């Protein structure tokens, strides 16, 4: 069946998600490392490494983005959210050195999307993260657009494999 | 973790990025609604306990379950909405009569929705061109010529054109036909435009 008439809800721009977008729903399923700042009684079964009845305060675990966003409060009584490796200083330096070299699909297929969402958690590194996202995108954009214009007869799968999902959508 | 079933349903649709309509996942929907009911009941119980015994320490868990309820609701709504977008596309791709194998994949409510959509579109089209009507589902791309060369990809039986002549559409036969008559059959995969 031709794709001409099916127009799915696109992902949101920047820090906003589109409620009905399948892409944003998948994006917000990605897991983040968190630390609980209070206890969660009777929900011990969610934390696979223990048999406890409750999740005690100070537990380090992974929660999906949607749940982290839902529970997070600025005053930090509930959760503190850590940065995944890709957004930390070490990796940010790699990106500034040469943005085109990295396989963004392997780093979690929603590098830009997840990065934008992480800004919701008030990390002191937020402005550096935002800068890194932008610079990486700009650096890779030129390369991606050039290749897509010249892709008429060539096999582009090797290049497309290393793109994040936002870049893939642009490429098409 | 909660909401795994709902995610399965979302992935099922996301996989079919070309707009195909999979069978309506009635079973999945039922399971998600059951999970929501269980979450809701646990929260009701905890809220009552928190109020009656001052157990404010239960509040984070209540909040967590509430997030799961909202998440399930979001997934179901997006699932149903995306399916409607696909069904709407069917009117434009296949015309107003859907092939049986596609109808089979739709729920009763979706079939009803399709009927309503068809009606809205038809009355809109009738209102165009000063009451004369205009079929906007034809010629979606600007045509280059009025007649086109087509090859038949499968047996489709007899086909009547404007001046009364009947053409027999047999697999691999080629014909020179008015473009607008062929469009729908090309989209359905019965005919293929031959570009020499």
Image (tube, rainbow, N blue to C red):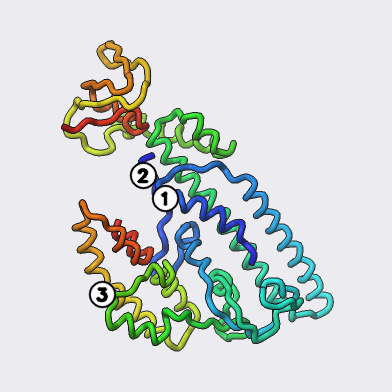
Residue at the image point whose x is 72% and y is 57% from the top: B37
Q: Are marks 3 and 2 on the same chain?
A: yes
Q: Is residue A54 above or below residue B167?
A: below
Residue at the image point whose x is 47% and y is 40% from the top: B87
Q: Is residue A100 above or below residue B17?
A: below
Q: Secondary structure at mark 2?
A: loop
Q: Is residue A43 left or right of residue A26?
A: right
Q: Chain of mark 1?
A: B
Q: If the image is split into quadrants, where does the C terminus of chain A sit? A: bottom left
Q: Are marks 1 and 2 in contact (CB under 8 Å)?
A: yes
Q: Which residue is mark 1?
A: B17
Q: Earlier in the sequence, mark 3 or mark 2?
A: 2
Whether residue A116 is visible to the viewer of this picture, yes or no, is yes
Residue at the image point whose x is 52% and y is 38% from the top: B113
**Residue A165, x across and y down, in percent:** 38, 63
**Residue B60, x across and y down, in percent:** 68, 77
Judged from this view, the residue extending furthest toward the bottom is: A124
Q: Secondary structure at mark 3?
A: helix
Q: Which mark is residue B114?
A: none
Q: Chain of mark 2?
A: A
**Residue A86, x across and y down, in percent:** 42, 79
Q: Are marks 1 and 2 on the same chain?
A: no
Q: Which mark is residue A3?
A: 2
Residue at the image point whose x is 33% and y is 74% from the top: A102
Front-most of residues A120 and A172: A172
């Amino acid at each position: 069946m031709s794709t001409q008439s099916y127009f799915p809800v696109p992902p949101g721009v920047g820090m906003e998600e589109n409620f009905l977008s399948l892409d944003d729903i998948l994006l917000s399923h990605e897991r983040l490392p968190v630390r609980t700042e209070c206890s969660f009684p009777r929900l011990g079964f969610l934390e696979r490494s223990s048999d406890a009845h409750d999740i005690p305060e100070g537990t380090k675990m992974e929660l999906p983005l949607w749940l982290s966003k839902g529970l997070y409060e600025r005053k930090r009584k509930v959760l503190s959210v850590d940065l995944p490796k890709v957004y930390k200083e070490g990796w940010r330096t790699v990106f500034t050195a040469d943005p085109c070299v990295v396989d963004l699909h392997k780093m979690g297929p929603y590098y830009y999307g997840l990065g934008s969402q992480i800004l919701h958690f008030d990390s002191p590194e937020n402005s550096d993260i935002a800068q890194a996202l932008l610079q990486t995108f700009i650096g890779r954009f030129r390369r991606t657009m050039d290749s897509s214009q010249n892709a008429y007869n060539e096999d582009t799968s090797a290049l497309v494999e290393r793109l994040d999902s936002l870049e893939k959508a642009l490429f098409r | 973790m909660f909401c795994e079933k709902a995610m399965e349903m979302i992935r099922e649709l996301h996989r079919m990025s070309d707009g195909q309509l999979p069978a309506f996942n009635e079973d999945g929907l039922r399971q998600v609604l059951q999970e929501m009911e269980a979450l809701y009941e646990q929260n009701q119980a905890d809220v009552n306990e928190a109020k009656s015994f001052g157990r404010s320490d239960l509040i984070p868990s209540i909040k967590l379950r509430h997030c799961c309820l909202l998440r399930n609701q979001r997934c179901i709504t997006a699932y149903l909405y995306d399916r409607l977008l696909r069904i709407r596309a069917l009117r434009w791709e296949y015309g107003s009569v859907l092939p049986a194998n596609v109808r089979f994949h739709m729920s009763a409510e979706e079939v009803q929705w399709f009927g309503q959509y068809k009606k809205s579109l038809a009355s809109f089209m009738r209102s165009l061109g000063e009451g004369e009507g205009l079929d906007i589902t034809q010629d979606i791309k600007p045509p280059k010529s009025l007649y086109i060369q087509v090859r038949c990809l499968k047996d489709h039986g007899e086909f009547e054109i404007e001046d009364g002549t009947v053409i027999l559409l047999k697999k691999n036969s080629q014909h020179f036909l008015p473009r607008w008559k062929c469009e729908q059959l090309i989209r359905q995969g019965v005919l293929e435009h031959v570009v020499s």
